Structure formats: structure tokens, C-alpha cells
Amino acid sequence: MTELDTDITPTAALLDEETQLRLSTIDERTCFDIGSTIAQRSADEGLATTIGVYLHDRLVYKAAFAGTTSDNDLVIAAKRNVAQLDGHSSLYARNRYLEAGTSFEKATGKQFPEYAPYGGAVPLRTVDDQVLGYVVVSGLTQEEDHRLAVEAIRAAQQNA
């Protein structure tokens, strides 16, 4: 890792977080509620975000706020592609390679625009460990994008 990379969230912490982010039900309503939670926060705080919530391969919820562009739509899809590779968050994918002293791009040969190894795509995982979809946020820093997705999934857990 370079000196600039020392502030990354450790992959062990991200995996632990994923084990806590499990939902008993993941359906269209769950996806709508999670997307709406992020959208409401974005509206209330004036956050420039684009939000995509997927159930399997289907985009169930999408919203885009002022300050984002069609480039964010590309990034949403590319972050999701990264998370789909191994069923972990896109931030985990990025950081695991940084911890190993390389980068996602160098290790996998996968490049933007198809893949974006930046935080913001978080799997929707059932209590029995099945990944049924993804919550993806773009527009803020990658850590903030990740955090917004995680907080919305936690809110869905509490409302279940």
C-alpha cells in the first residue's frame, strides 16, 4: 500500500459489516424502501447522488438528484458489476487489492467503463446468505456512497 492508501477501511471490517447486513425479506417493496431512504436523506441534506437498487438483475428503484449527470448512471452500473463478481461490496473489492499491494484493475484486468472498483455498491443479502440484489450509490466520496447504502439497509432491518 502507498501512504495515500493507509486510510482505507480494512477488508475484515467490511466483511464483518456484511455479516450484519442481512434481511429476512428482500423483494420489490424492500428495494423501494431502501432506495426511498437514501433519496429522502439526499433531498433533506442536498446530497448530489444517483441511486440504483436492484433485485436480481432488475433495476427496481432509481433516483438522481441535482449535481449528478449521466456519468453517474455509468458508474452505478460499473460499481454493481464489481460487486457482482464475488457478492461483496465494491468497496471491499477495491480495498482487498489495495491491502495486497496492487489494484483491482491490475489484478483482474477489468477496467472502466464496465467496472468501477469504488465504494457504493452493497449486496442485499438474506439471513441465509443469499445475495438477491444490490444497493448502489454514486455522487459523493466512495466511502460516503458506501455509508449511505449501508445505513439504508440497516434502516430496512429495523423496519422489518
Image (cartoon, helix red, strand yellow):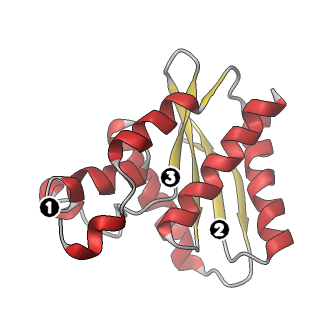
| x and y, in percent, of residue 122 in the image | 52, 46
Checking the image for residue 50, the label placed there is 2
Residue 123 seen in the current view? yes
| x and y, in percent, of residue 89 in the image | 44, 46
Residue for point 65% across, 68% down: 50
Q: Is residue 29 above or below residue 53?
A: above
Tag 3–tag 2 contact (CB < 8 Å): no
* Residue 49 as seen in the image, left or right of residue 4: right
Residue for point 58% across, 73% down: 140
Amino acid identity at mark 3:
Ala
Checking the image for residue 102, the label placed there is 1
Q: Earlier in the sequence, mark 1 or mark 2?
A: 2
Checking the image for residue 147, the label placed there is none
For mark 3, what is the residue?
A: 121
Residue for point 56% across, 69% down: 73
Give the residue at the far top of this rendering: 128
